[in-house]
Amino acid sequence: MRAAAPIALALLVALGGCEREKRSFSTPQPAVSPTESSARLSTNQPAAPLAGGVRQPASDTGPYEENAFAVNQGKRLYRWYNCNGCHANGGGGIGPPLMDADWRYGGGPAQIFQSIVQGRPNGMPSFGGHIPDDQVWQIVAYVRSMSGQLRKDVAPSRSDGMSQGEPENARDRLPPRPERLPADQPTGGAQR
C-alpha cells in the first residue's frame, strides 16, 4: 500500500503539468461584449462587406495567453488569414512590425483585439464578423508572443515552415511603447 502512494503522487504531479498543452475542444466563454457596440474604423474588409458594428473585448486579458496549443493555433491562423501578407512574419512590410516594442494603438490583448475586429485607418482591414471571436483571441495571443509578451513555455518554439528568425519563445521581452501621434490625429481605439 505504501509503494502505491509515491506512484499516485507522481501521476498527480504529471497530470498537473498537462495544462500548458491542453487542447480544448470547446471555446471559452466569449471575452467580448454581448452587443455590437463599436463602429468599424476601416472601410476595408477581407470579403463581402458586413454592415453594423463590432463587439468589443469585455476585459483587457485574453483567454488563451497561458495555453500553448491555442497560441500555436493562433500562429496557424495568422498564416491562414494572410496576416503575414502585410506584417510579414512579424517584421513588418506594408503593415507595422509586430516583433518590436513600438505599438501605435497599444500592445495589450484588448487593444490588439480591437485592431483586428475594428480595423484601423490607412490600411488595417476590419475582420470583425469575418473571423470568429475565439480565433481572433488566438491570433491576439500569438501576436503578443511575437514580441516576447508571453511566457517562454507558452510561446511557439518552432515553425512548420522555413525559419524567418528566432522562435517566439527565444525572443526577449519588449514592453510595448505607445507611439506618440500628432495632437490632431484621433487614435480611435487600439491597434497594432
Image: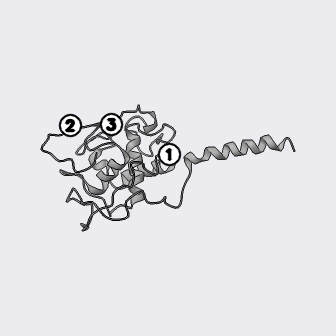
Label 1 crowd bin: few (<14), some (14–19), many (20+), radius 10 Å = some
For the residues labelled 1 and 2, the Cα–Cα distance comes to: 31 Å
Residue 93 higher or lower than 29, as above or below:
above
Q: Secondary structure at mark 2?
A: loop
On the question of residue 162 being in view, the answer is: no
Label 3 crowd bin: few (<14), some (14–19), many (20+), radius 10 Å = some
Quarter holding residue 92: top left
Specify which label sits upstream in the sequence, 1 or 2: 1
Q: Nearest the camera: 85 or 64?
A: 64
Which numbered marker is on residue 66?
Answer: 1
Q: Can you say which quadrant of the picture contains the C terminus?
A: top left
Q: Image point 26% across, 50% down: which residue?
A: 189
Where does the image place residue 179, in percent across and percent down from the top left? 23, 37
Q: Where is mark 3, residue-wise?
A: 176
Q: Image point 46% across, 50% down: which residue?
A: 64
Where does the image place residue 50, in percent across and percent down from the top left? 26, 67
For the residues labelled 3 and 1, the Cα–Cα distance comes to: 19 Å
Looking at the rendered structure, the kind of residue marked 1 is Glu
Residue 51 higher or lower than 15, as above or below:
below
Q: Secondary structure at mark 1?
A: loop
Q: Where is mark 2, residue-wise?
A: 180
